[in-house]
Amino acid sequence: MSEEKMITVYIMGKAYQVPFGLTIMKAMEYAGYRFIRGSGCRAGFCGACATVYRKKGEYKFRTALACQTTAEDGMYLAQLPFVPANRKEYNINELDPEKNVLSEYYPEINRCVSCNTCTKACPQELDVMYYIQAAIRGDYRQVSELSFDCIQCGLCTARCPAEITHYHVAQLARRIYGKYQLKVPEHLEKRLKEIEEGKFDEEIERLKNMSIDELKSAYVQRDIEKIPRGEVSDE
Amino acid sequence: MKLIGGYTEEMRESIEMVEKTRDERMKKSFPPMSLEEREEVLNKYHPDYKPDKKRAVKVGPNKGDLAPHEVVDLLEAYPLIDPKEIDLKTIDYDVDLLIIGGGGAGTVAALWANENGVPAENILMATKLRHGDANSMMAQGGIQAADRPEDSPAIHYLDVMGGGHFANKPELVEALVKDAPFILKWHEELGVQYDRNPDGSYVERPGGGTSRFRLHSAKDYTGMEIMRVIRDEFRNREIPVLEFTPAVELLKDSEGNVAGAVLFNMETEQYYVVRAKATVLATGGFGRLHIQGFPTTNHYGATADGLVMAYRAGAKLRDLDTVQYHPTGAAYPEQIVGLLITEKVRGMGAQPVNKNGELFVFPMEPRDVEAASFIRECARGNCVETPTGMKGIWLDSPMIEEIEGEGAIKRNLDAMYRMYKRFGIDMTKDPILVFPTLHYQNGGVEIDAESRTSVNGLFAGGEVEGGVHGKNRLMGNSLLDYNVFGRRAGISAAKFASKRSKPTGLNLKHVDSYIKELEKAKVPKERRSPMLLPDYRGEKVLARMLDIF
Amino acid sequence: MDIELVEIPKWNCCGAVSSLTADDVMHHVAPIRNLIRVIEMNEEGLVNDEKRLIVFCSMCFNVLRRSNKRVKEDPKFLETINSFMDEERDYDGSVKVMHFLEILRDIGFYKVKERVKKPLKGLKVSAYYGCTLLRPRGVGIDDPEAPSIMEKFIESLGAEVVDNPYKSLCCGSYHTVGGNKELVAERAYKIINAARERGADLIITSCPLCAFNLDNRQELTKKIHPDFEHMPVLYFTQLMALAMGMESETGFDGNYIDPRPLLRERGFLEG
Ligand SMILES: Cc1cc2nc3c(=O)[nH]c(=O)nc-3n(C[C@H](O)[C@H](O)[C@H](O)COP(=O)(O)OP(=O)(O)OC[C@H]3O[C@@H](n4cnc5c(N)ncnc54)[C@H](O)[C@@H]3O)c2cc1C
Ligand code: SF4
Ligand code: SF4
Ligand code: FES
């Protein structure tokens, strides 16, 4: 270990000395916090660790994922344990994708004043404002593409002056796009039919009844689809 | 410490070597190992094959079976609750179906139980963190299903068996591979988006140990895409869920069936008694046990609670002697050590190379073999060392851009790209440093093809159960597993519940007798389980902690 | 007509819905953000047009031009907006907001006439301006008391102009979404009847809300006044597409009162 450089962070206003080079999450743990809320995947996928902070001497109100952000000297930190958000129940099978379902279920999206605060709050650096704009237009594909990496942390929603619940709007849009506008590939439909007709039953039955040695030799002899480019499997 | 593009000067020197050999390597290949070669590298270098890291369990249904010390320590441990202190007369939740664990398996089970006649209000999900804070949310690479004409469920079957060292339970593998295409169709109907080719077919990629391209992904957010859709559907059905309220012990009725659980509200520290006609265990894996000190890819709540509870209730476990180490966990920078670098990075063409820029292994060996080869390469002194003393192998990610064209990383591996960028590294230009990390619980509670455990009334699906993957799981088969066996658990539990009346005579006698066994085996009294959450508080804090409030 | 229109990448709604009724700083953010996009487009070489933003909808036009005017006249106000949008480049007031009709006028209506393939001979068209194209003074595109730009447009398509004394009477605007649909229906009654009395076949407008109010509200108008006769209400560009022989672009499917039977009868549409 190289010698530890210590920094000062303020957890909900209280100063703690922690080593430099930790994530905000690990820095809080080092300081003695044991999370119940505020820690989920610890890897940037679940949005449990939404954090707001300010740096000493700065007017900017910043947001971050505690598990994906290095703690810096002079950070004033607080976690968002929960975001109360308006979510509508719906039946995915009974929606009419020809209409703007998003506007229907979440009419408040039309209150967007294009202040862009949501975009600035997003730790995934998504174009949140633009996906809301696309939602206003009922453009499911665009909402889908722009919001795909949304980890539903709720930071945008906590900051929006128009009280929009962006991530629920986006979830609805993605499901509509996925269900109604992307087609089920033919090869999948075909395979389902084959399975239903029992096409593979016999072969699987045969494999199931093999001794381990027979299986091993079948395994070794199975042909391996070539990985294109470079890596050749049979030399 | 001076960093250039996120790396130290020493690391930069090694990166130069990697760059120098890249063109040559692009044309080159490395032969896959024979079964004998695999055996050899595993025996010598895989962490699982070190005899001193395991011991035989002294109590319970698997008495005499080997498992890692960290797991045995939890199995041979006293319960958190004192059965005498729990008032089982007052029932807080009285339901048909209790689902323990709010990850993928639990959610799928709830949906299919609902689909099979259990009304939403008669289901209760209890989970430790938030609904969806789970390994299922984190999967990046993809899900397997043999749906291309070049592929078949039978070929899939053979791959699974071979990957699992032929120790898998055949009936479970059959269910896994045969249900797979159906699961994709179900996802489609719910609105899950899998990557498409321009002609509308799925993009399918190879995974370690698969003989066909059958990995379906949603960029590198596959797990998240599936999980958030099924959770959304779960919410639409208004199925009740208790968050931050893990189960701490299973309950039985007078006939010895599992009949609910004792839950613990971690925020108010109060317990609840749940009576249920059927119980589904979906608590996931055990990465947070940090077996042999390895870092892990797993979420905060992956602490083997389900294994412990089921074992005390008499359920048989299996294949716990092997643990999956994912070959490519982040080894640098320190902030993300242990986090997963999806196998898709190799699937898309990035080669693992040593500090001299040499390719030393076939990039797509099964996980255990690949991981062992990395460790061997380090033993040969060919590892890169980080400033904090971690060792690592380069994963030559810029190759992906050369092979698939500029922008391929951002398009397909956005989560990875974003993570490295957050810490100052551009993986489209520089390689990334990796080392094996604790990833998956290969074994678990034994089930049959209907997802029944060996104890009546208890069903299991997902990472907590065992038998599907034998001694080693292949990539993309565990998202599939939680869908296939989560669904089967939900359906079986719904059937079971519909056939029985409300359980009577709730008791914790199985815990009492387990305690007796522990005492007989002279297990140290201070050992307690389930763990619920790991403790990462700083040592200085722990040293001065008072338990007075 | 030697003009090429390029869509703003990532445009946002100008906020017309709220900004006409409230005038705080926040509501100017949305329009100005679009104007910044225009500057960026010029810088990135996507367009090269002296930073003109062409708007088709009167309402959006009104909002955008009003905001633009406000920031040009009030540097302190501009500074506040710029510092609020500190993630964007500063706006400098250099974009010119223009309604599409203005562009046509600048190019010359004779050029429009040259492009007409099917002159709408004998079709009697009444122009409806509403409010937002003309008011307030200094924002509007024509004399608010005696506007003539739409009439010139109608003539250039070969149709016949029918004057309407109520051509800039407010259609009721947002009352249509609030509780007062009846007010809107009454206005439609008044405006459409005046046009009919003077022999008009149809009405054109350049505002989607006016179009909605005059078109879709006719259902309610008919309920209140059973004697009322329907009249098609077209967006001005629909008429232009028809005259220029771009029938597939006319989008008549979206009209509540279908103009096609009339247009077929007059021989302007096939079939
Ligand atoms: C980083 C990462 C990447 C992966 N990538 C892939 C991949 O690409 N393809 C693939 O097929 N697989 C992948 N896997 C594996 C796969 O994601 C998991 O094995 C699978 O999702 C497990 O699902 P599950 O529902 O069984 O468990 P989980 O999703 O972990 O859910 C278990 C839930 O139970 C809760 N819980 C735990 N204890 C208790 C208790 N006592 N009471 C109540 N609730 C409790 C947990 O908090 C959690 O919410 C990956 C795993 C990780 C960690
Ligand atoms: S924060 Fe709200 S109001 Fe502002 S741009 Fe985003 S969605 Fe619109
Ligand atoms: S869009 Fe909103 S909820 Fe989604 S990741 Fe960004 S800030 Fe979080
Ligand atoms: S803990 Fe999941 S995103 Fe940080």
Image (cartoon, coloured by chain):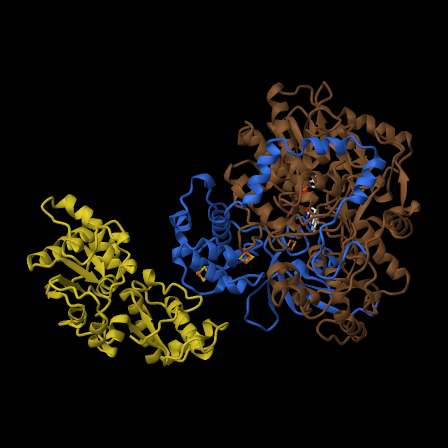
Q: Residue B137, image x and y in percent?
A: 64, 48
Vertical comparison of A123 with B38: above or below: below
- Tell me the quarter of the picture where residue B275 sits: top right
Q: Residue at x 15, y 50 (%)?
A: C230
- Give chain C's shade: yellow
Vertical comparison of C82 with B448: above or below: below
Quarter of the image with the N terminus of chain A in it: bottom right
Residue B76 appears in the picture as rendered: no
- Give chain B's shade: brown
Side of B297 relative to B203 (left or right): right
**Along the viewing direction, whichever of C48 and C79 lies nearer the viewer:** C48
Q: Which chain's colour is blue?
A: A
Quadrant of ligand 4: it is bottom right
Q: Residue at x 66, y 44 (%)?
A: B151
Side of C69 relative to A186 (left or right): left
Q: Residue at x 23, y 68 (%)?
A: C133
Q: Residue B287, image x and y in percent?
A: 76, 47
